[in-house]
Image (cartoon, rainbow, N blue to C red):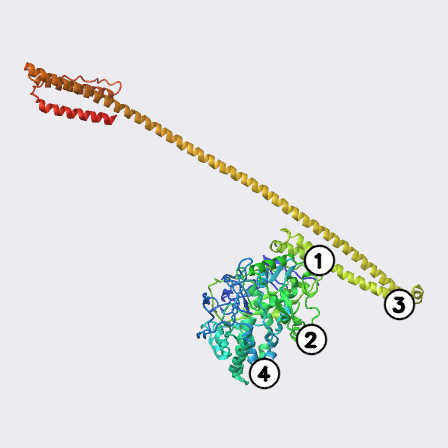
């Protein structure tokens, strides 16, 4: 039966019966009152992994209503105080004094995983990987429980999970895989197609139950009364579901989880176990139930459904009220839903909340060519016990780059789609119980987080060929509130709010089937949809339109078909040889006609198989030729593009140079124009100066003529004085002569100036001034007249020299 497709109606996709849509739409008018709360990127080991302190986040195509700050950070997680670390100064020795008591219990371990320079060693610079709760504390408390409590944990189904050994986080691998995650279809986008961790991976790797009731229920506005009644503790705030981790950890006997000076790991674990054993109840009763609930909320809130904040979320506490029903919930499915939601955050937020060892071991099994894990403990279950991280001393940035390069160059045949073939399921009862949920499209639930598992995108994990299916797209019918909005707004019953998706879980989803004979159509559709996003690796040939990778996928699919058909041919040939030996020649064939007919049928079947095999080989050779030709054409096209770009760059450079020349010429012309204007202005000023100089020269000539007249007058005065003294003539006539001559000169000068100022054609001519009337001559004292004449002479000489 072929895959059903959804047709767009009015721009939206409507689900067919039994199909899983990408998102569900709420009825009109029903707004989502529950807030989305951004999750701060604090790392919890092993439940939360973070690489930087970026506060950004983005939505995913799931029902992720952040109804409480505790689920994804919340109070205590978003506004976390940074731990200040004082480095020991040179010369200081190692202190052996006992540390001062602190009101807060310190972190159990503090592991740094930074992003330094390209080849620098890893060190605490920008990003760090911190563990606020490691496996050691959980293991110590588990070992401190009395036998009847451990038996109850086994009955609940948490025994295999609690016996897991700590796995060192592979920060580079998780960050590289997160960058390949597509929040629209909830899958990794790789060269060979979609890849998704499934419920089978969760069951086999972690040992958690993936069948049973969905982890959902009611979220409340306040958990204070419930926490006090069931745990005997207090929440951080009135409207919160968060319990301080330090108080919860101390209530289980581990009040001080720090390593003491000179204490080894064995002594450390023995001390923690002894402290826990001394604080835990040793007999059944209300106190033992309270201890068990505290431990379960610690394991669920910090390991299975861990957040980035330090406080522990008590959202699952209502499900722990009846301890006999705790084992009936699908905690593994909730773990996968929480991991999908964390992977769908913004690419700038490089942390991954949740149980990241699942993603790490999943990559070890399906992508062994990356070489990030080392196998150990063959046959151990759950499968997480079989792996350990291969330590890499290179910088985190360098490791992430190398992993991306490897993902861009991994051959299609090196991907393990069915790595669990041959596993003994009898030793894994949790796998046998979860088989009815394997290989199905189904909705995963964790209270307000409801995400789809699109198993139809990875049909190859079921041993089927991948058919062309409708690729999911993100369609959100509500808007996400601001990132500063937090807190529960009202009591929400998620069994009613997401009833349709919950019914799908109870029906066990929809089985994935495929009638495709090859993956060819899927590869072409995948290249058209995600080509620009996937086929851009630095180590791959230039393939902007996605032509090469689909051919590689088709060639790989053809090789697989050839191998399968070769096995069939070998089997038919073996059966034919066996039949011929049984027949024993032509004589025996006449005795037994049935055997002869069987021999002929086998021969014809073998011939047909050989013909088909030959055709497949021809098709394989054609594909290899087409792949080589396409690669060559892409390389030539890339070279032509580079040439064209080089020509464009040269033309742009020439145009830029020409523009520069034009700008320089324009600037030069402007400068010349300004200089010409300046020259005209200077010429006008020079003309004005020449005119003024001519007037000054004329005035100087006049002054010199007056000075000569005065000199002659002085000479005449001297002669007249001598004549007067000899002849006795009075000096009044000489003074009258001097006065008359100077008056005449003034009159002549004024007349000349009046003529120069008179306009042309004026009828009014110059007036003739009458000669001055004779005045009575007074006797000029020579002693007084001579200094005045000398003073006038000096004044005339000074004015003449100044004008010159």
Q: Secondary structure at mark 3?
A: helix
Q: Earlier in the sequence, mark 1 or mark 3?
A: 1
**Are there few (<14), some (14-19), or many (20+) residues within 10 Å of tag 1?**
many
Asked whether disc 4 touches disc 3, contact meaning CB atoms under 8 Å apart, the reply is no
State the image quarter where residue 325 is shown. Answer: bottom right
Secondary structure of the residue carrying tag 4 is: helix
Residue at the spot of label 3: 582
Q: Residues within 10 Å of mark 3 (few under 14, many from 20)?
A: few
As drawn, is 778 to the left or to the right of 264?
A: left
What separation in Å lies between label 1 and label 3 (alpha carbons)? 39 Å
Query: Which secondary structure, mark 2?
Result: helix
Q: Given contact means CB atoms under 8 Å apart, are the residues at marks 1 and 3 in contact?
A: no
Q: Earlier in the sequence, mark 4 or mark 3?
A: 4
Give the labeled residue for mark 4.
147
**C-alpha distance separating marks 4 and 2:** 26 Å
Q: Which residue is mark 1?
A: 556
């Amino acid at each position: 039966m072929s895959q059903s497709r959804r047709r767009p109606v009015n721009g939206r996709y409507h689900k067919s019966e039994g199909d899983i849509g990408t998102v569900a739409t709420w009825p009109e008018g029903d707004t989502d009152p529950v807030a989305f709360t951004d999750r701060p990127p604090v790392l919890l080991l092993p439940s939360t992994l973070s690489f930087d302190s970026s506060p950004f986040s983005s939505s995913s195509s799931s029902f992720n209503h952040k109804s409480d700050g505790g689920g994804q950070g919340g109070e205590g997680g978003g506004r976390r105080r940074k731990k200040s670390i004082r480095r020991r100064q040179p010369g200081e020795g190692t202190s052996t004094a006992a540390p001062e008591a602190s009101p807060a219990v310190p972190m159990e371990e503090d592991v740094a995983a930074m992003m330094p320079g390209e080849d620098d060693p890893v060190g605490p610079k920008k990003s760090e990987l911190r563990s606020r709760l490691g496996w050691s504390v959980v293991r110590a408390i588990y070992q401190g429980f009395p036998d009847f409590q451990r038996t109850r944990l086994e009955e609940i189904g948490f025994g295999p999970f609690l016996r897991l050994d700590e796995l060192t986080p592979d920060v580079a691998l998780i960050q590289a895989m997160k960058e390949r995650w597509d929040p629209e279809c909830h899958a990794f986008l790789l060269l060979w197609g979609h890849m998704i961790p499934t419920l089978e991976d969760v069951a086999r790797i972690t040992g958690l139950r993936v069948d049973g009731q969905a982890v959902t229920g009611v979220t409340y506005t306040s958990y204070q009364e419930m926490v006090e009644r069931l745990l005997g503790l207090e929440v951080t705030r009135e409207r919160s579901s968060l319990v301080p981790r330090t108080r919860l950890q101390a209530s289980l006997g581990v009040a001080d989880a720090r390593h003491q000076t000179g204490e080894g790991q064995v002594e450390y674990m023995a001390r923690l176990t002894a402290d826990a054993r001394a604080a835990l109840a040793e007999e059944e009763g209300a106190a033992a139930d309270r201890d068990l609930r505290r431990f379960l909320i610690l394991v669920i809130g910090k390991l299975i459904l861990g957040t980035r904040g330090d406080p522990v979320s008590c959202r699952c506490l209502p499900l722990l009220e009846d301890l006999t029903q705790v084992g009936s919930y699908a905690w593994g499915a909730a773990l996968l839903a929480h991991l999908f939601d964390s992977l769908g955050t913004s690419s700038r937020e490089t942390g991954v909340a949740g149980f990241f060892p699942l993603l790490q071991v999943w990559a070890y099994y399906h992508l062994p060519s990356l070489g990030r894990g080392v196998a150990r403990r063959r046959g151990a279950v759950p499968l997480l016990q079989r792996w350990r991280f291969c330590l890499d001393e290179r910088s985190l940035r360098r490791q992430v780059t190398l992993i991306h390069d490897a993902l861009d160059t991994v051959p299609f045949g090196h991907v393990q789609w069915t790595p669990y073939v041959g596993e003994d399921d009898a030793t894994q009862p949790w796998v046998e119980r979860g088989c009815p949920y394997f290989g199905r499209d189904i909705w995963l639930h964790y209270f307000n987080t409801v995400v789809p598992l699109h198993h139809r995108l990875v049909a190859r994990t079921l041993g089927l060929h991948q058919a062309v299916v409708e690729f999911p797209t993100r369609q959100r019918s509500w808007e996400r509130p601001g990132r500063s909005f937090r807190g529960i707004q009202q009591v929400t019953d998620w069994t009613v709010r997401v009833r349709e998706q919950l019914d799908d879980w109870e029906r066990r989803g929809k089985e994935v089937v495929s009638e495709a004979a090859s993956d060819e159509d899927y590869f072409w559709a995948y290249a058209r949809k995600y080509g620009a996003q996937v086929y851009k690796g630095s180590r791959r040939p230039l393939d902007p339109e996605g032509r090469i990778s689909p051919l590689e996928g088709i060639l790989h699919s053809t090789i697989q078909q050839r191998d399968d058909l070769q096995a069939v041919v070998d089997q038919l040939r073996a059966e034919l040889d066996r039949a011929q030996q049984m027949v024993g020649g032509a004589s025996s064939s006449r005795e037994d006609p049935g055997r002869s007919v069987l021999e002929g049928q086998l021969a014809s079947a073998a011939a047909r198989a050989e013909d088909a095999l030959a055709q497949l080989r021809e098709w394989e050779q054609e594909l290899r030729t087409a792949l080589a030709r396409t690669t060559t054409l892409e390389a030539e096209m890339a070279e032509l593009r580079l040439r064209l770009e080089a020509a464009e760059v040269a033309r742009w450079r020439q145009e830029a140079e020409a523009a520069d020349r034009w700008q320089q010429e324009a600037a030069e012309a402007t400068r010349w124009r300004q200089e010409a204007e300046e020259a005209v202005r200077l010429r006008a000023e020079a003309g004005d100066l020449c005119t003024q100089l001519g007037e000054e020269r004329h005035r100087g000539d006049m002054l010199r003529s007056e000075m000569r007249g005065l000199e002659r007058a002085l000479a005449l005065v001297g002669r007249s004085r001598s004549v007067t003294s000899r002849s006795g003539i009075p000096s009044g006539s000489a003074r009258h002569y001097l006065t008359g001559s100077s008056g005449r000169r003034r009159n002549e000068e004024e007349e000349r100036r009046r003529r120069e100022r008179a306009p042309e054609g004026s009828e009014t001519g110059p007036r003739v001034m009458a000669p001055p009337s004779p005045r009575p001559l007074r006797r000029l004292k020579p002693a007084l007249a001579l200094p005045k004449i000398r003073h006038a002479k000096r004044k005339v000489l000074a004015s003449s020299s100044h004008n010159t």
